[in-house]
Image (tube, rainbow, N blue to C red):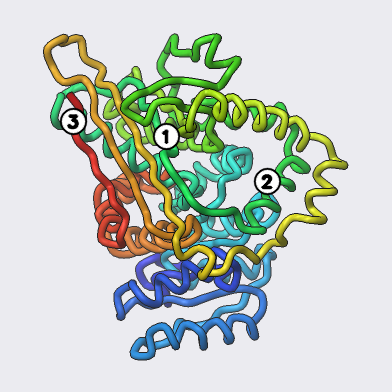
Amino acid sequence: MASNQSRQYEVILFGATGYTGKYTAEYLTTSSPTNLKWAIAGRSQSKLRDLAKELQTLNPNRPSPAIETSDLDPTSLEKLALKTKVLVTTVGPYHKYGTAVLAACAETGTHYLDVTGEIPWVYDMVNQYHDTAKQTGAIIIPQCGVESAPSDLMCWALVNHIRETLHTGTGEIVYSMHDMKGSASGGTLSTILTLFDRYGLGELAKSSARWSISAVKPPKQDYSKSLTEKLTGLRTVNDLGGTLTDSLQSVDIPIVHRSWSLYDGGRLYGDKIHFTPYMRASGALQGLAVHFAMGFGILALLLPPVRWLLQRYVTQPGSGATKEHTAKDFVEWRAIATADSTDATAPKRASARWRFEGSLYHMTGILVAEAALAIARDKTPAHGMGGGVLTPATLGGKYLDRMKAAGVTVEVATTP
């Protein structure tokens, strides 16, 4: 195995010609250090050459990235992985195309990042490759895009703020998609549909459980939603805009709780922590509609004929909204964390806000690109953990600072 420090590149972006890959390549071209040694990679050399020409127009004074071609077979991917410190892959669906890439990185000591939201696949990768990556020193971080970096980083920031200012652990973190304008790409829609082809309902439920990928034994907790909330999906939190309803970001729950386990075996976060994502609704009627639409939608996707019909008519992988259509897109999340404190006179809560002006895919490109730079050039908690299948939050404060410098608004404060 080659030394990670002596490799040809600092970063290779695999899948650079895809929809999310192109956003990532453009960000690296315009915003990464000019001395970054990086390459774009994929299966089609002609498409990569065309992309390199496009990137050159964005930053004419910067050398074009190198071009590397690779198939998806283990031998080709191992050769690709051995050329770089960090390999970023945007080639999905990951349950179809991601395992061989992740395995090649884990086995060669190459740091790895992806932008999946496929928690059943991540569950499998934790069980299959965490020990291997730990042995080789490879930092493996799945779900480092819109799923699940913002929620994971916000929770980490809230936990640290409460620990530093209130000197205690954290109880519940209520997290809400406060506002958003945007649309899903063809790749995202295709992934959702094929995920139900690959995994059964039992596997989906098992992998999505709160502590499913915790690295240590979870604490005993009696937290559960009220019966009314279970039936309606509704909850009222005035500090988060009033009425909240079910969220599509339930896949973030196991990631946040894995972060709990990776930081000092849960002692940083405390044994009362539990993370619950929601989406802000305009009122109870809309909240109920979302709750039942999501429930019936999942049931419908379990039926093969429904998935077949949708796959024929949804946007195809590799495509999505144009930059003109996403020019006014934005996203904002808010969160409230309750301190685990028995002092009735002390401040008991902290709040956080994350806002980005731009499309979710643009933000994902920034998230994964800055994560790659943090791994390649910074000293993060993930490095101190010695590798393994980790989480976005294990990149710590320097990664969060990088996101702020890239234009993301992140605010954390004590709330009276």
- Is residue 166 left or right of 116 when viewed as pictured? left
Looking at the picture, how far across and down is residue 226, in whole percent?
A: 50, 11
Q: Which residue is depicted at the point 85% across and 40% down?
A: 304
Q: Is residue 150 above or below residue 42?
A: above
Q: Earlier in the sequence, mark 1 or mark 3?
A: 1
> Could you classify mark 3 by the number of other residues whose Cα lies within 10 Å: few (under 14), some (14-19), or many (20 or more)?
some
Would you say the residues marked 1 and 3 are in contact, meaning their CB atoms lie under 8 Å apart? no
Callout 3 amino acid: Thr
Q: Is mark 1 on a helix, strand or loop?
A: strand
Q: In this view, does 240 lie above or below 343?
A: below
Q: Earlier in the sequence, mark 2 or mark 3?
A: 2
Callout 2 amino acid: Ile
Residue 109 appearing in the image = no
Looking at the picture, how far across and down is residue 96, in whole percent?
A: 70, 53
- Is residue 271 left or right of 88 when viewed as pictured? left
User: Which residue matches tag 2?
Assistant: 192
Q: Which residue is depicted at the point 36% across and 76% down?
A: 30
Looking at the picture, how far across and down is residue 293, in whole percent?
A: 67, 31
**Which label lies toward us, 2 or 1?**
1
- Residue 344 or residue 263, whichever sits in front: 344
Q: Which residue is depicted at the point 33% across and 49% down?
A: 395
Q: Which residue is depicted at the point 57% across and 71% down?
A: 79
Q: What element carries label 2?
A: helix
Q: In which quarter of the image is residue 256?
A: top left
Q: Is residue 366 above or below residue 31?
A: above
Callout 1 amino acid: Ser
User: Which residue matches tag 3?
Assistant: 414
- Whole-Å distance between the Cαs marked 2 and 3? 38 Å
Residue 263 appearing in the image = yes
Looking at the picture, how far across and down is residue 416, in whole percent?
A: 17, 24
User: Which residue matches tag 1?
Assistant: 176
